[in-house]
Amino acid sequence: MKKKMEQSDQPLSAGGMINPKKKKSKVSGSSINGWLFASPWIIGLLLFYAFPLFSSIYFSFTTYSILSPGEFIGLDNYKQLMSDGLFWKSIYNTIYFAVFFVPLSIIIGVALAMMLNMRVKGMAVYRTIFFLPTLVPHVALAVLWMWLLNPGFGLVNGVLDAIGITGPNWLGSVTWSKPSLILMSLWAIGQPVIIYLAGLGDIPQELYEAADVDGASWLQKTFKVTIPLLTPVIFFNLVMGAIGAFQQFTLPYTMTQGQGTPDNSMTFYVMYLYDNAFKYFQMGYASAMAWILFIVIMLLTAVIFISSKRWVHYQGK
């Protein structure tokens, strides 16, 4: 009886057979509705992402600026970049920041997550305190640290003077400017810490209990159980941290008012790209820089993904 009722719901032709045309029109109608609902997102993707993306490829081979359409010059923009001293300086500054910040953010982030994963009374308050710096806007963060690192009346040098150490000119020294920026960035790693905490919560407690039965020490459990099972989360934060490090912009730009002082030690790649695009109106030159950055980030990400097969361990594998 149920089978007959199901068959009666199908569109029938004059001979009592299922009409394939009506069934096809019903499917095509639902497909059209789906495309209509998705159309705002598709239009936005094409208009604000795909079109600028492919346009920038063409602009990188031209002298295009906001004020004039420019002329096609082939690879001249890329050749000029190879002889641009400030271009190479910005690459050095960016790589310096990435090489030190990314590993430190992983080490400190994992250590903080393990501390915040302890069963201590009021731990929710401590977790909130460590996450709060992430909520501070980067401009406000830069202003705060400019005051803290001021060589004359800054709190950091004041504490160092109290213990008999003469503090350096943090932001006014070529030697200390980039380490100062790394320090500021490490202060706001609350978001990766939360992700590490989620990863720690996913590790089965049975593994720690088995390690206790075998007489493993805390250090052995950390390096034999915790770190290996946390590697998928470390891998994710490594990729995101590397991409973010190569796009460093807001903090150094705010602290130096876009000048990159002292002696261009704070001129990062994206800062120089921004200056060429919106200060000097050399959009073709800036587009060439953007595509070089895109290729470098893609290659770096590919290397991390390929190497992950050797050191990332997933549960059950």
Image (cartoon, helix red, strand yellow):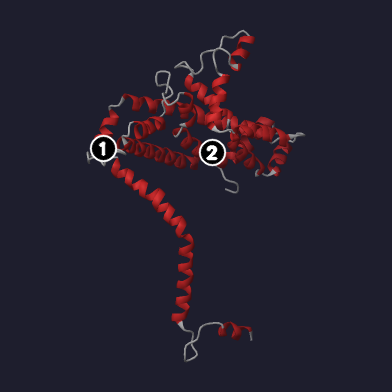
- Left or right of 124? Residue 44 is left
Mark 2, Cα crowd under 10 Å, few <14 / some 14-19 / many 20+, is many
Amino acid bearing label 1:
Thr
Say if 59 sits above or below 259 in the image: below
**Residue displayed at 70% across by 43% down:** 205
Residue 216, picture quadrant: top right
**Residue displayed at 33% across by 31% down:** 280
**Residue at the outermost top position:** 164
**Residue displayed at 32% across by 46% down:** 55
Amino acid bearing label 2:
Asn
**Residue at the outermost front position:** 67
> How far across and how far down the image is residue 138, in percent?
53, 31
Residue holding disc 2: 237
> How far across and how far down the image is residue 19, in percent?
46, 84
Mark 1 or 2, closer to the camera: 1
- Left or right of 202? Residue 93 is left
> How far across and how far down the image is residue 136, in percent?
59, 33
Q: What element does badge 1 sit on? A: loop
Q: What element does badge 2 sit on? A: helix
Q: Nearer the viewer, residue 268 or 294?
A: 268
**Residue displayed at 49% across by 84% down:** 18
**Residue at the outermost right position:** 121
Residue holding disc 1: 63
Pick whichever of labels 1 and 2 is earlier in the sequence.
1
Residue 207, picture quadrant: top right
Residue 217, picture quadrant: top right
Q: Which mark is residue 133?
A: none
Q: CA distance from mark 1 to mark 2?
A: 38 Å
Q: Nearer the viewer, residue 297 or 81?
A: 81
> How far across and how far down the image is residue 293, in percent?
38, 36
Mark 1, Cα crowd under 10 Å, few <14 / some 14-19 / many 20+, is many
